[in-house]
Image (cartoon, rainbow, N blue to C red):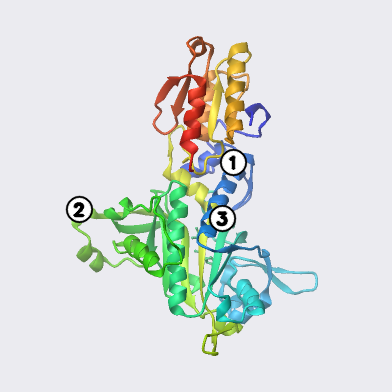
């Protein structure tokens, strides 16, 4: 993409309404625009990152054997009356009447709708295990929408639902989600710590939240410092192997890590050596639940077991805050000049800065680098504007592309361009072809 043809409405001034850094940078980098309280339009670069995040979620869900579908945002109140949640959900639910006076709602979550799909089409244990998920907009009329996409009213969620014949199988689904979520967040450059949590209006006793440590997080967290060192890495995990998956979960949940809802000072002091006891704040980027037959029983979603018995199906649900993740990633990865995108989610793989637009040699070198990167399947952003070098650097730093190739007449005289890491600020001079090869190498396998 050429910046002169792109729509990147960068703001020079700090927007007064933004209280935290991710909100400030998302507005300044022209990624989002508020439409009304807690509701945003996604401008091209913001939308691009959102889609990158969605893609990683889809890839990791497919790896775990889960199937994507899409359900409507507007649902009938009748289904929610069957589960008993229509009255229980409260003010957060946006209630709507259609022209016929029927009660409708904008889905804050979709346990009822998925249970209705299940009961209509599945009746035998032979069709299980089954996990269906979607990435779809949700609406929750939060009392205090704030911090931009972090706590929106309309927000994008990945919501998944597992159906299993008994509790053991459903707990394997729970564990499988935990492991696949760990991999999902790691690919986005995040350390998200599973912490035992409260289940709230979704229900059930078994639930973990995934928290990214950040001083601006909304939850207070208590953890063993050693938990921040755990990594899944490139381990090859067989998601159908119950023992293997359970062992990984044990590894990630044995050390103490709790939110203020579940914190137990006595256990904390007993189990964590004093020098490793940490208190901080965290951003909740996901939550998984096992709630058994809470929905299947009242809604009559049953399966026939191998012995011919008809039993309510065992379920859980699992959510990732897809739009919230943009804010969480920026909170975890930025400096005072702007965003620093992890390679896994960056909107463009690298920037190309032409220090002297209009200089025949510099223009030709930039064009050649742009063409070479594009031919390798990479997506560069070429700042081809007729602007001062300082302005170009400031824009690149703000929008946070992890790599920048700087091209100017002086370097070209010696046959070199400059390759700069946004994260470390370190630069290296090398011939243009080598700069291209290095970028290609960096993104191999990401
Ligand atoms: C799990 C999927 C559920 O709703 N039902 C279906 C279960 N879980 S949850 O924890 O309530 O939400 C899942 C994740 O969505 C994000 N989230 C939000 N993101 C932005 N703005 C909001 N107002 C908001 N509310 C929830 C969180 O990341 C949460 O973990």
Marks 2 and 1 in Cβ contact (< 8 Å): no
Badge 2 marks a residue whose secondary structure is helix
Q: How many marks?
A: 3
Closer-to-camera residue (50/96): 50
Q: CA distance from mark 3 to mark 1?
A: 22 Å
Pointer 3 or 2: first along the chain: 3
Q: Position of residue 242 (x, y in %)?
A: 41, 69
| Closer mark to the observer between disc 3 and disc 2 | 3
Question: Residue at label 1?
Answer: 31
Label 3 packing within 10 angstroms: few (<14), some (14-19), many (20+): many
Apparent side of residue 171 relative to residue 353 in the rendered image (left or right): left
Classify mark 2 as within 8 Å of ligand 1 or not, answering yes or no.
no
Badge 3 marks a residue whose secondary structure is helix
Pointer 2 or 1: first along the chain: 1
**Does 149 appear above or below 382?**
below
Q: Which mark is residue 85?
A: none
Quadrant in the picture for residue 95? bottom right
Question: Residue at label 2?
Answer: 275
């Amino acid at each position: 993409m050429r910046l002169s043809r792109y729509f990147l409405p960068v703001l020079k001034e700090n927007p007064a309404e933004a209280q935290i850094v991710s909100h400030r940078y998302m507005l300044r980098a022209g990624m989002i625009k508020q439409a009304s309280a807690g509701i945003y339009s996604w401008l091209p670069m913001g939308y691009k990152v959102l889609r990158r995040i969605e893609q990683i979620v889809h890839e990791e869900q497919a790896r775990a054997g889960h199937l994507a579908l899409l359900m409507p945002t507007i649902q009938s109140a009748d289904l929610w009356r069957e589960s008993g949640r229509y009255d229980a959900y409260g003010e957060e639910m946006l209630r709507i009447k259609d022209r016929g006076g029927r009660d409708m709602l904008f889905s804050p979550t979709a346990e009822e709708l998925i249970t209705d799909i299940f009961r209509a089409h599945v009746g035998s244990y032979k069709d299980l295990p089954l996990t269906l998920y979607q990435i779809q907009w949700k609406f929750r009329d939060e009392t205090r929408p704030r911090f931009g996409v972090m706590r929106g009213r309309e927000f994008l969620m990945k919501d998944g639902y597992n159906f299993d014949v008994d509790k053991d199988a459903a707990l394997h689904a729970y564990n499988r989600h935990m492991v696949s979520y760990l991999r999902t967040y790691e690919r986005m450059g995040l350390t998200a710590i599973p912490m035992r949590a409260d289940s709230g209006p979704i229900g059930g006793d078994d639930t973990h939240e995934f928290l990214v440590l950040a001083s601006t997080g909304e939850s207070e967290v208590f953890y063993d410092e050693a938990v921040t060192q755990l990594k899944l890495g490139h381990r090859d995990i067989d998601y159908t192997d119950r023992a293997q998956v359970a062992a990984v979960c044990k590894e990630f949940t044995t050390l103490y890590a709790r939110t203020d809802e579940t914190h137990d000072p006595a256990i904390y002091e007993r189990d964590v050596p004093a020098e490793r006891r940490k208190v901080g704040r965290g951003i909740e980027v996901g939550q998984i639940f096992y709630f058994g037959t809470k929905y299947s029983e009242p809604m009559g979603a049953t399966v026939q077991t191998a012995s011919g018995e008809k039993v309510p199906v065992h379920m859980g649900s699992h959510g990732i805050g897809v739009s919230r993740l943009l804010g969480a990633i920026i909170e975890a990865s930025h400096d005072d000049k702007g965003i620093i995108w992890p390679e896994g989610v960056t909107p463009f793989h690298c920037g190309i800065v032409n220090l002297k637009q209009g200089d025949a040699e510099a223009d030709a070198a930039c064009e050649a680098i742009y063409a070479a990167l594009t031919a390798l399947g990479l997506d560069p952003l070429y700042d081809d504007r007729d602007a001062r070098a300082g302005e170009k650097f400031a824009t690149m730093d703000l929008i946070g592309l992890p790599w920048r190739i700087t091209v100017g007449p002086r370097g070209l005289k010696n046959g070199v361009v400059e390759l700069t890491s946004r994260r470390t600020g370190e630069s290296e001079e090398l011939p243009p072809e080598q700069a291209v090869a290095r970028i290609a190498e960096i993104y191999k396998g990401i």
